[in-house]
Image (cartoon, rainbow, N blue to C red):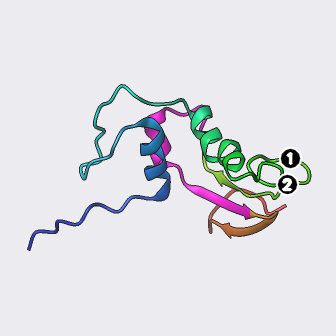
């Protein structure tokens, strides 16, 4: 029987599709398009700009004293790797309201 279900993507891959405007096919190749945004714009759209739209920019959306510390730690720097590699990032840690809620088993990231 032929499996016609779409391939399962990690959430980072779906996010990458949104800002690069490049969809991953089942063969994991990119379809070409001229429309995209840079990584800084993409991150702002998911953080401080989204918080502003929700009228929550005083409590979320950026890492500042007095705000909830909600963020993810990735295995590589999104600002320095090629856009095509962002979909392959591995989450090392997730922090919500200043508390570690996820930590990869073999992460080099310290809990302190």
Question: Quadrant of the image for the C terminus?
Answer: bottom right
Question: Looking at the image, which residue is at 71% across and 46% down?
Answer: 52
The residue indicated by pointer 2 is 67
Kind of element beneath mark 1: loop
Q: Which residues are magenta?
A: 76-95
Furthest residue in direction right, as rendered: 65
Q: From the top left corner, tell me how far across and down residue 59 is, in percent.
A: 82, 55
| Side of 25 where 3 appears, left or right | left
Which quadrant of the structure image shows residue 91? bottom right
The N terminus, quarter of image:
bottom left
Q: Nearer the viewer, residue 30 or 64?
A: 64
The answer to which image quadrant residue 17 occupies is top left
Q: Which residue is mark 1?
A: 64
Left or right, residue 105 beside residue 23: right
Q: Position of residue 46 (x, y in %)?
A: 61, 46
Q: Is residue 40 magenta?
A: no
Query: How much space separates mark 1 and mark 2, taking CA atoms?
Result: 6 Å
- Residue at the location (57% across, 38% down)? 42
Q: Residue furthest top?
A: 34
Taking 45 as reference, is 73 above or below it? below
Q: Quarter of the image holding residue 96?
A: bottom right
Local SS, label 2: loop
- The answer to whether the residues at label 1 and label 2 have Cβ atoms under 8 Å apart is yes
């Amino acid at each position: 029987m032929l499996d016609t279900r779409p391939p399962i993507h990690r959430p980072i891959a779906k996010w990458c599709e949104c800002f690069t405007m490049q969809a991953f096919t089942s063969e994991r190749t990119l379809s070409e398009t001229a429309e995209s945004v840079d990584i800084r714009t993409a991150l702002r759209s998911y953080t401080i700009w989204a918080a502003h739209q929700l009228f929550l920019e005083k409590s979320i959306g950026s890492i500042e004293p007095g705000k909830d510390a909600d963020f993810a730690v990735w295995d590589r720097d999104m600002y320095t790797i090629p856009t095509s590699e962002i979909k392959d990032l591995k989450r090392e840690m997730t922090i919500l309201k200043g508390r570690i809620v996820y930590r990869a088993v073999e992460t080099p990231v310290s809990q302190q």
